[in-house]
Image (cartoon, rainbow, N blue to C red):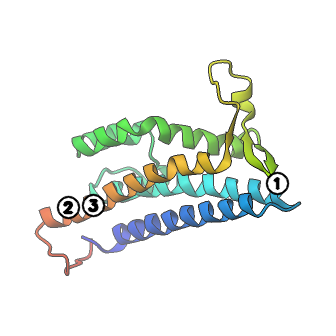
Amino acid sequence: MFGGELHASVANSIERLGMVYLGREILTQEVHNFTGLSQILLKFHLYHWLYDSVACLDSLARVLNVLLDLGIAPREVNLNRRFIGILESRQKELSRVIDKEYVWIEDLRNMRSTIIHREGRLITGGGQEPCFVWDFQRAFNPNIDLNRVKLPDLVDEFMPKIDFLCHMVISEVLEEQKRKGFSSGQFPSD
């Protein structure tokens, strides 16, 4: 049960979460130790943080796909509405929890997709001034009142939420293991 693809998916999720934390620390250091290169480095690290955050969430979906045998092709698995609908057929409670979290998941995914496919982000400030991320899409949307957000606040807003989902999904692996009658020392293959 905890071998092969499931083991690889859990390991990948944990590695991705580690990269998200590393990215947060590097961004924090760049904000506090501002130099002439910091605008470029901040953008570089922010983009990687966004990429790793969404990759971490998608790897959690892969864990659930394997664990609950949802039957989604590996290349098509990501934490989106379609996935939550399929998950609901096997694990209603878990799908409800993820569905409640979906607004911020979609926000994070949209930020990542926007920088990859449409536009970059302008990072202003630094040194004695706080670093802000300027979001062009928000700047022209009159319904969104924040045209710029402080970089550490943006990242720190998502960290506890990503942690929560990681903990919930990894706990589900352990619960499924118990339901199938395996003790914590046994790791049979898939």
Residue at horizontal 68%, vertical 22%?
A: 141
Real-space Cα distance between discs 2 and 1? 46 Å
Count residues near mark 2 (Cα–Cα under 10 Å), then give few for <14, some for 14-19, many for 20+: some
Residue at horizontal 62%, vertical 56%?
A: 49
In the image: residue 38, left or right of residue 138: right
Q: What residue type is labelled 3?
A: Ser
Residue where numbered disc 3 is placed: 171
Quadrant into which the N terminus falls: bottom left
N-terminal-most mark, 2 or 1: 1
Q: What residue type is labelled 1?
A: Gln
Residue 109: percent from left, percent from top: 56, 43
**Count of marks placed on residues:** 3
Real-space Cα distance between discs 1 and 3? 39 Å
Residue at horizontal 19%, vertical 80%?
A: 186
Residue 174: percent from left, percent from top: 23, 65
Residue where numbered disc 1 is placed: 39
Residue 46 picture quarter: bottom right
Residue 22: percent from left, percent from top: 59, 67
Residue where numbered disc 2 is placed: 176
Task: Tell me the mark number nearer the camera, choosing from 2 and 1.
Answer: 1
